[in-house]
Image (spheres, rainbow, N blue to C red):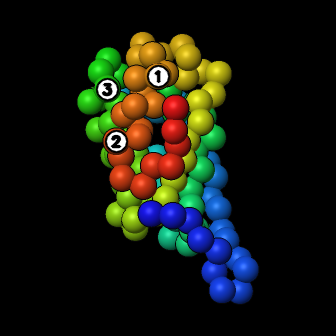
Amino acid sequence: MEPRFHHDGTFRVLMFSDFHAGKACSPKLIEGIEALVSETKPDMVLVGGDQCLDVDTKEEAREYMSRIMEPVLRRGLPWAAVFGNHDREMGLPLNIEQQAYEEIPGCLSKA
């Protein structure tokens, strides 16, 4: 899945950040992402940090991020993520969380 410009030269990027969701992620977060993706019809999605995945294993991180990003994944959109200052405060080391992201379809982020 390689991002490409449209024939008219356009390319739309949707960026959001600061989920600060924790294990008890509100369904409103996913509903909000769904609304943003539906309205903007992006070609690519960027996640700008502070996901704050309060998880203990790589598998939990992959499952959790996949659930949050479901509106993006369902549409087969490429996406990438970076870490913010609060992500370092969570239990899972960022290199392990990055490995989990890289296992999610459409992820363009690389360690």
Question: Toward which corner of the image does residue 66 lie, by quadrant?
Answer: top left
Q: Residue placed at 45% from the left, 16% from the top?
A: 93
Please, is residue 105 above or below residue 99 in the view?
A: below
Whether residue 74 is visible: yes
Measured in 3D between alpha carbons, the distance from the residue under mark 2 to the one under mark 3, in whole angstroms, is 10 Å
Q: Residue placed at 44% from the left, 59% from the top?
A: 72
Q: Residues within 10 Å of mark 2 (few under 14, many from 20)?
A: few
Query: Residue under circle 3?
Result: 58
Mark in front: 2 vs 3? 2
Q: Residue 4, image x and y in percent?
A: 59, 71
Question: Toward which corner of the image does residue 62 lie, by quadrant?
Answer: top left
Please, is residue 79 above or below residue 44 in the view?
A: above
Q: Relative to 12, is 57 on the left or the right?
A: left
Residue at the bottom extreme of this rendering: 8
Q: Helix or strand or loop: what does disc 2 sit on?
A: loop
Q: In front: 90, or 44?
A: 44
Q: Helix or strand or loop: what does disc 3 sit on?
A: helix
Q: Relative to 59, is 46 on the left or the right?
A: right
Measured in 3D between alpha carbons, the distance from the residue under mark 1 to the one under mark 3, in whole angstroms, is 10 Å
Please, is residue 106 above or below residue 1 in the view?
A: above
Q: Residue 108, image x and y in percent?
A: 50, 49
Query: Residue under circle 1?
Result: 95
**First of labels 1, 3 by sequence position:** 3
Are discs 2 and 3 less than 8 Å apart at CB? no
Measured in 3D between alpha carbons, the distance from the residue under mark 2 to the one under mark 1, in whole angstroms, is 13 Å
Query: Residue under circle 2?
Result: 103
Q: In front: 21, or 5?
A: 5
Mark in front: 1 vs 3? 1
Kind of residue at badge 2: Glu
Kind of residue at badge 1: Asn
